[in-house]
Image (tube, helix red, strand yellow):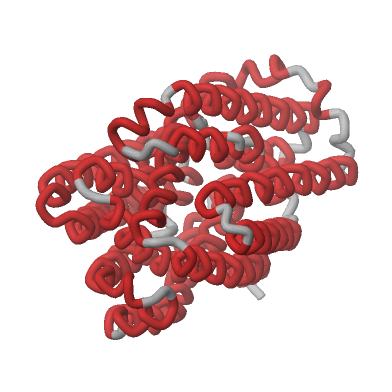
Amino acid sequence: MNGSDTLHGKLYKNASWLFGGKAASSIFTTVQLIIIARFLELSEYGLLETVIAYVGMLNLLLDFNVWETATKYIGSFWADNQKDKVCSMIKLSYTIDISTGILAFIIVILTAGIANKYFIKTDTAFVFIYIYAFSLLVDTANSTSDAILRVFDKFKKIAYISSIQNFIRLALVLFFLIYDWSIKGILLAYVLASIFGFFYRLMTVHKVLVENDLRHWYKARISLLKDHRKEILWFIANTSFAATLKASTDKYLGVLLLGFFSTKEAVGLYKIAKSFTQVISRFSNPLHEAIYPELVKIKSSNQITNLIDLIKRSTITLVKISIPLVIVMILFPEQILNIVVGTKYIEASNVLRILIIAVFISQLTFWTAPTFLALGKPGLRTMIQLASILVYIILILLLVPEYAHIGAALALLGHAFTKSVISVSSLKRIMGKNK
């Protein structure tokens, strides 16, 4: 077995654990979606998603999304047997995550009035924002915890924790809805499940660090990283900005602008269709998370041929899995929506058709983001993200006021196409030079 086959096998072993965890999580999340959609009215569902989008968007603007930086530098220092720097990087990553989480929580609470006036437009919004804001205090540190587990090949642990957390969230959502807590109960369930996941991850990470003689990481001196300071700051600035741009388009911006220009019903229809497209994201996300550490290692050994081969083979596998799901959702969206969430959401069928095409385009180029980082091109990735989000915002402003949820879906399709074309052409040019 050659080196490429070995790496390919390892990638799919790790991705399989992540996929297993995400498959289980998908089942719990899908059941949760069905329960929430059937318990709530369409306008209530739109209100719930607008609250989540506002809190999530503010968190994005403040969160440094440190997991990619942590994965790269913890992995690199560990490969070079520099344990002191590994500990310093762990401490730095947790410090950044926890600090930004606290800051985001404070700002969300202080700006609740602004959110209610312009986006949510409901008297009870303050209570909902206050409840959901508590998730920021516990969720932000999870990115560093998961990065550590990835570096030490604990993908099975990540899958298990994710599955258990989503099961607990589902159980709590059902419990609170049965007792008629409505939106307040759903948000409380999210927060309680996040608290469980936070402490479970910390216990798991502690065990892994003890096993690798890194138990005293919290005593490390961050000053040990001074020789890498500029490099780390540049890397984290670019990955943070790029992640903010990506997540804002994927999750929150469309919802918030729909809330601003249109109705809660439009938000509900757009978001329900978006939720169904996440089915195929469950296949690419594990590959994205698993391929990044391997690409870093391949680039470190300057094996560009193996890097290209790994990308090609993983993309082909993903396409084979995704195409049947895409075809079914394009041909039968009305039937799917009616059976799963009820007749009140059938109007979202054309939105689902458009969004599934947009998501599939993104699936085909899932490898571009981790490849830019592995090749040491975070700045180029950021510029591409910025260009594509500008296209997205222009399309939203042109289409959403008149076409509401359909316009938001078309804007996302334009964003996905723009980003994919520019990313692939740029990487072809870069890897061609490095062969």
* Place of residue 87 in the rendered image (x, y in percent of width and height, measured from the top left): 77, 30
* Place of residue 158 in the rendered image (x, y in percent of width and height, measured from the top left): 70, 56
Question: Could you tell whether 78 is left or right of 72 in the image?
Answer: right
353 versus 402 height, above or below: below
Q: In which quarter of the image is the N terminus?
A: bottom right
Image quadrant in which you'd find residue 410 = bottom left
Q: Residue at x 48, y 72 (%)?
A: 313
> Can residue 56 be seen at all in this image of the molecule?
yes
Q: Quadrant of the C terminus?
A: bottom left
Number of dots carrying numbers: 0
* In the foreground, 163 or 288: 163
Question: Could you tell whether 418 is left or right of 434 in the image?
Answer: left
Image quadrant in which you'd find residue 368 = bottom left
87 versus 307 height, above or below: above
* In the foreground, 205 or 48: 48
Q: Which residue is drawn at 38% across and 34% down?
A: 379
* Place of residue 279 in the rendered image (x, y in percent of width and height, measured from the top left): 46, 70
